[in-house]
Amino acid sequence: MSRKLYELVGRDADRPFSPHCWKARLALKHKGLDFETVPVPFTEIPRIEGGASKIVPLLKDGERMVADSFLIAEYLEEAYPDAPTLFGGEGGRRLARFVEAWSTATIHAALPGFVIMDIHDILAETDQAYFRQSREARMGRALEAVVEGREARVEGFVKSLAPLRRMIEAQPFLGGESPLFADYIVFGAFQWLRVVSAFPLLPAGDPVAVWFERCLDLYEGHGRAVPAAADAA
Amino acid sequence: MSRKLYELVGRDADRPFSPHCWKARLALKHKGLDFETVPVPFTEIPRIEGGASKIVPLLKDGERMVADSFLIAEYLEEAYPDAPTLFGGEGGRRLARFVEAWSTATIHAALPGFVIMDIHDILAETDQAYFRQSREARMGRALEAVVEGREARVEGFVKSLAPLRRMIEAQPFLGGESPLFADYIVFGAFQWLRVVSAFPLLPAGDPVAVWFERCLDLYEGHGRAVPAAADAA
């Protein structure tokens, strides 16, 4: 097959967990494209395709290589214009960046405070050392300290999802009746959580949890094919 | 003229302040449409056009009447398809709702805590009574208590604008090189603040403040034609 998605894994090559890689996966499924995935641990990323990228996901489509989930979605939209649209036009492409900015500031900023030790724990030994060193340097404290007192932060986090909740109370997806890349942007964050940690963050009846389950059902349950940490444990 | 926008005012009919009415104003300017505005105080809203609407903005375009800023934008997009687009396609229309949900949860939810007394103070006497009663009932405390200790909340508020800030650090408008209705959604909230209150909320050099000034410049400084409370005081 000539289409390869390089994506991040820990010790278990069958449990990709990077939010950004999941965004790219669903973008490919959305376009109806076949692809094979190539699992890569943190410390092997610099060696992919002879040093082609410092980050994953990296998509190799024939001879073309694109790294970064948003750029991959933009590439797919342009390269496969006859397949279902990921953005719904130029305005949708622009505002998907707003959804990304919101997801980054709200979900990605908060999740390490809940699950960074779980991420650490699923990595292979070499990657654990790299992960601890790089993250502790960035955050200025021990990984253990980052998750300390996480129970007390759950309520504030759940509340911070208000804009998403308001949208999906009114319709199945951010994109309306069917998903757009904007949905996958937020899905990626919750799938990250689901694959790495059994920590219960979203109340089951929360509209956000219902929407997430709906996203897991997409493309014959593609996202569900990797069991939740809560079930895998 | 056959196009009328009914919009909220206080004692001074020349100082419309409703965020939603400003969204509708800029949507009309964006489409290059002429319109006249009809100032309406809170307690007169039920009498507009013989009771046509419980809310403003209300647009009367010929015989067609549309209330609610988002519905007005959707109406204009459909009725004037050859004028510049407000949404940039269906995806942009869908995700503009996300920007609206974010603005509601983040900015509209916070602003009363800074300026609800200022809003009260610019209203005519009859409207002040209505405003105090309805808002105090909704919020369960005196208006004076709502703004108490507001200085301590500024930093958190400024920080909560991160998704917007991230977007406009990278480009002039949420819409990219030029604005979309999504820009006006957020502009409306800050124009509300600007018209009703001299309370300094945004640091001058904040990218959000820079973007807001850029929005004030649009359409020959349309938003600037109503002086800021800080200057009018």
Image: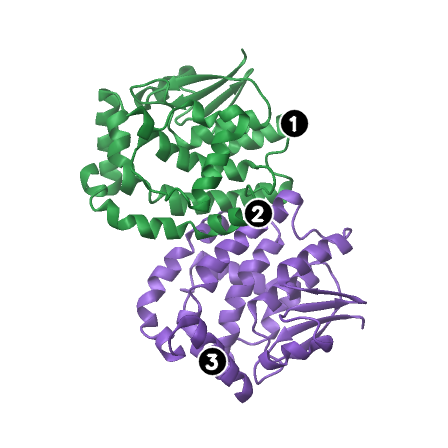
Chain colours: A green, B purple
Q: Residues within 10 Å of mark 1 (few under 14, many from 20)?
A: few
Q: Amino acid at mark 2?
A: Leu
Q: Is residue B219 visible?
A: yes
The reply to whether the C-beta atoms of the residues labelled 3 and 2 are less than 8 Å apart is: no
Q: Chain of mark 1?
A: A
Give the distance between the C-alpha atoms of the residues marked 3 and 2, in whole angstroms. 35 Å
Circle number at residue B133: 3
Which numbered mark, 1 or 3, is in the foreground of this view?
A: 3
* Percent coordinates x, y for residue A51 in the rendering: 40, 19
Circle number at residue B95: 2
* Residue A151 sits above or below residue A180 on the image: below
Quadrant for the C terminus of chain A in the image: top left
- Circle 2: element type: helix
- Circle 3: element type: helix
Direction from residue B51 to residue A116 in the image, left or right: left
Q: Residue furthest bottom?
A: B125
Q: Chain of mark 2?
A: B
Q: Which residue is mark 1?
A: A83
Give the distance between the C-alpha atoms of the residues marked 1 and 3, in whole angstroms. 55 Å
Q: Is residue B198 visible?
A: no
Circle number at residue B158: none
* Percent coordinates x, y for residue B186 in the rendering: 53, 59
